[in-house]
Amino acid sequence: MYSILVEDEFGISRDELIEELEKKGIETRTFFISMHEQPVFQNMGLSEFKGESYPVADELARKGLYLPSSSGLKEEEIRYICDAIKNIDKRR
């Protein structure tokens, strides 16, 4: 699984990058939300999560993006994905 963090310095948000990649036919997935924000854990009433803050987990969930990955992914497809991200960066 290939993942990246879309840092603020990139100039667009993770969600904007997802939209741009979708226009080029590239599917992505966001990172899972932090455990302390997942309804299943909130509904369990776990005291470990009440009133706590997890800034690193929150930042990863907000900036994280999974790129296409598969044992069948061809080198030309990998290059296409990389070039698409590079070209989005160059447009700004």
Image: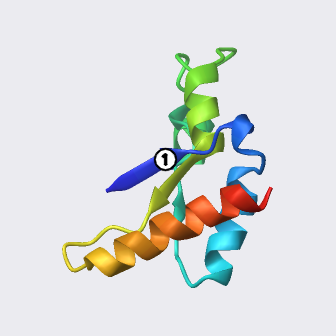
The residue lying at 53 percent from left, 53 percent from top is 65
Residue 32 appears in the figure = yes
| Amino acid type assigned to the residue bearing label 1 in the image | Ile
Camera-nearest residue between 56 and 74: 74
Which quadrant holds residue 84?
bottom right
Image point 55% across, 17% down: which residue? 47
Quadrant in the picture for the N terminus: bottom left
- Expressed as whole percent of the image width and height from the top left, the position of residue 63 reads 62, 42
User: Dot 1, crowdedness within 10 Å: few (<14), some or many (≥20)?
Assistant: some
- Say left or right for 71 vs 44: left
In this view, the residue farthest toward the left is: 71
Q: Measuring 68% from the left and 63% from the top, which residue is drawn there? A: 88
Q: Position of residue 41 (x, y in %)?
A: 52, 37
Camera-side residue of 83 and 22: 83
Left or right for 91, reference 79? right
> Could you say which quadrant of the image residue 49 lies in?
top right
List the residue tagged with mark 1: 4
Q: Is residue 17 left or right of residue 25?
A: right
* Quadrant, the C terminus: bottom right
Q: Is residue 38 visible?
A: no
Dot 1: what SS?
A: strand
Task: Place residue 69 in its image quadrant.
Answer: bottom left
The image shows residue 14 at horizontal and vertical percentages of: 68, 52
